[in-house]
Image (tube, helix red, strand yellow):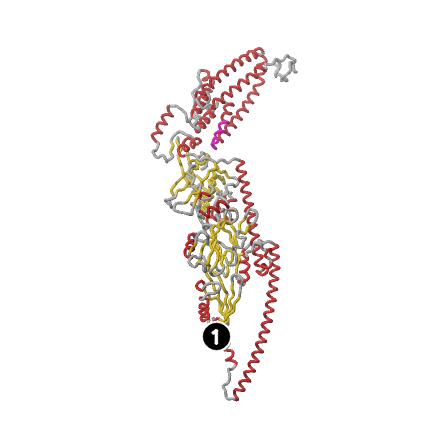
Amino acid sequence: MYCRKCGAENADHAKFCGKCGAELVQIPQESTQEEKSAEKKVEENLQKDFEAEETENFQEIEQERKQEAEQQETKRRKNFRIAAAVGISAVLIAGVTTGVYFGMKDKQEKTFQTKIAMADKYLEDMEYEKAEELYLESIKIDPKERKSYDKLAEIYTAQGKEKKAEAILKKAKENGAVAKGQEVPKKEAQSNEKPAAEPVPDEKPSPNSSSQEENKEEEENKGEHTQDQDKIDDTKAVSLETYVDKVLVPKYGKCTAGTYESKYVKKDGEKKIVQPERLEKQKGVLASKLKDFDGDGEKELLVLMLKTGEEDKAKKDEKHNHVYLQMYEKKEKSIKLAAEYLALRNVMGNAETERQGIFLKESGGKIYICGSTANQYSLTARSHEYGMFAVNYDGTFREYASTKGLLTGEEHEKEITDISAKLEKIGLNATAKRMRGYSELWFEFDESGVEILAELTTTEQNGTEELSEFYETYDSSVLKPVQRKVTLKFDKKEIEAAAKRTEERLKKEQKKDEAYQKILDEYQEALLMGASEVQKDPEGYPNINPLLVFLTETDKGKTEIIYTMYDIDESGEKELLVGSRSNGGDERVVGVYCFDGVDAKNMFEDQTLAERSLLQIYENGTMYIYGSGGASYGNASFYRMDGEHTVIQTEQYTFDMEGHPEQPYYNDKEALSKEAFQKKLDSMGKTVSGLKWKTLSERITGEADPEAAKKAEEAKKKEEAKKAEEKKAQEEKAKKDEATKKKAEEAKKKEAETENAGQSQEGIKTPENPIQQEEEQTPVYSDSEIQKKLEEYYAKGTEDAKGEEMTVLEQESTKSEYLVKVTTKVPGNETAEQVLYEVTVNKITGETVQKRVLTDGKTVTFLLWEN
């Protein structure tokens, strides 16, 4: 407290001044506490006023407030009388505390401005509850400032709380609240008993103003409204902040964040094609953002509008859901739809899995509105759709990068190259990197530095049990509905969680790549080691398919080991396909591997892909394998992936041409003729083609495991040494054969000379000379004769195949030998062929050697002209 005599400051409990010794007089604390209590009570009642929903409640609360105010005034008068008793002291205290008062005023002003700024930001983001709380707090600090009241009125109007809006404006009038710079002069205020007339706020007129001018304006606007209810041209004096809730939501509806289900139904006219029902109960405003998108200093309103059941322009019988970008601007006294852009196509439709979203990215002083669609159909019809866009706004939406709609199939390399380069320029590096690595056109919504506005996902819920039962009956009722998730609010925790998910996914992809490289390392080592070495140690090569090992040995080094990546089931994760290609011919898949989250896994571990089997992958996700047991017997099986890193056998047929010649394909449910089975294959659609195969030799140097490379190098040296020994042995054998042949020729010549000498004496003709003997070694049979004879021979059929299924192909002819390959058709697929025999015919003797390429390599020798 301060001394009334000298003005010195003393401790609150002191009785005499420490400087001059005068007695100190204290103002009773009880009154001060009562005053504070009364003020607190008034503030609580003010808060109740703001929360009142009906006029009746407001009036009742107002009455209580007046009573409390009267009690407060009574106590203030009592305090005043006490203070008058110590008038001199009060004067001194007033003089000293003047500086303190103005210091507190400055602090209050800063606090007020801070709260207003924060509230404005929340209002811009349409977070009304947070904005309301801060505007109420600002009124407590300065009840004479009009802006807070007007902003609250806007919020209440947008929420449909008209009575509450009227109450807060009434409170502003009673408190004499005016906008900054429009305060009523003190003298004028004293000369009037009532508060000054309420001025018009700086920002915009109150939506509930009842002035004659505004009423006149409303009447004029009513006459200007269009009759087209679908056209947005609202001419009411509303603000961009309230336009969504006041105009758009009542007219079009509003989407709600949450999880929804869609059950499976059969596609019209199709017995075996089912798909999730299109979601229709969510429509209207999906999200919105108030921001200066075109950089002109004025804010625009971006609205994401979901329109359902729009007719497909290409397919009139189909309907889809689409998301549009709509940009609204305030033009004079009305809100206009300035531009519209079709952003996301086929949203929450018939795909089993979907991922769609829209976000903002600021770069180089511009705001980019970005979004993408990734739809995958995998259950009964296999396909996918990708679409992405990035646009700016400058009065209209301008495309920075776009796929120009939805793309299907694998052929979009040019789009990937062009779009990824553009995205890198604006800092979307994670998306650009993944696009180039996996050939997929969709955004990483979890990239750092982006503001997500909305994200829509659809996820399939079926496991092995449900899928197995479904593929037996094609009854859609056994399937679990897909789950659709609508996400609209993204706080800091959600963004951090999304970034963490992205990091984990990228780590998983890296681990998957490493697992696939391990498989390729094993094949590469096997190729260098040689088939014979690999066959001696099968446990050392657990992921090698025996067929590929066998072909590398029997095809005399002409077989290439090839590989590629392909997403069989459209799950978003590609599988590793390993195959073989002989003499530059067609590719043959001999191994399918998937990643189970830990390691690469052979999907056909039970040797389903054996020596005499053929795998075909169809575009609808079906894998067909025919295992041959000979020309007239085999097994035909159909498989699908189950989403859990394994395959399900959906159908299986036994092929028995001898036992069931009319209907050779049969199981426990049906029997089919060859023609009917071929139609079944044709109904699967097209087989996968155009895959970009690579050979192991094309792999980057140093990519293989160092230990494997070392072993391969040692094996290569061993193989070279072995070949050198074999070559030496062959040369020695050739020398011995030449020596033996020479001795035989000399003996024959000597014998002939002796015989000729005897015949000359008897007057008989002289035998053939050496030149005639040499001519006897020239070919007896021509190539055309041998070809014709072989065709006649194999037309009769063999133990392995029937004659009409085999074809003799002309391959190579030397001076003494004619070499051919005999192919046979693959049962169950009339368009596919495989090599059955390698045949060598001696042109001089007609001796024929037949080597069976498939299975055991059995060799048969016979004289062609005796068969």
Which residue is label 1 attached to?
780
Q: How many marks?
A: 1
The answer to whether residue 814 of the structure is visible from this angle is no
Q: Could you tell me residue 102's position as x and y percent?
A: 55, 21
- Quick one: quadrant of the N terminus? top right
Instruction: Answer above or below: position of 769 versus 814.
Output: below
Q: Is residue 80 magenta?
A: no
Q: Is residue 157 left or right of residue 517?
A: left
Q: Is residue 135 left or right of residue 210?
A: right
Q: Is residue 125 magenta?
A: yes
Q: Is residue 784 left or right of residue 92?
A: left
The answer to whether residue 582 of the structure is visible from this angle is yes
Q: Residue at x 62, y 55 (%)?
A: 707
Instruction: Answer above or below: position of 96 versus 706.
Output: above
Q: Could you tell me residue 136's position as x and y percent?
A: 49, 25
| Number of residues whose C-alpha sits closer than 10 Å to that of mark 1, classed few (under 14), some (14–19) or many (20 or more) | few
| Amino acid type for the residue under numbered disc 1 | Val
Q: Magenta stretch? A: 123-134
Nearer-the-camera pick, 710 or 174: 710
Q: Could you tell me residue 531's position as x and y percent?
A: 57, 60
Question: Which picture quadrant has residue 188?
Answer: top left
Determine the main secondary structure of the stretch shown in magenta. helix
Q: Could you tell me residue 737's position as x and y percent?
A: 58, 74
Q: Residue at x 55, y 84 (%)?
A: 753
Element under disc 1? loop
Instruction: Answer above or below: position of 837 versus 37.
Output: below
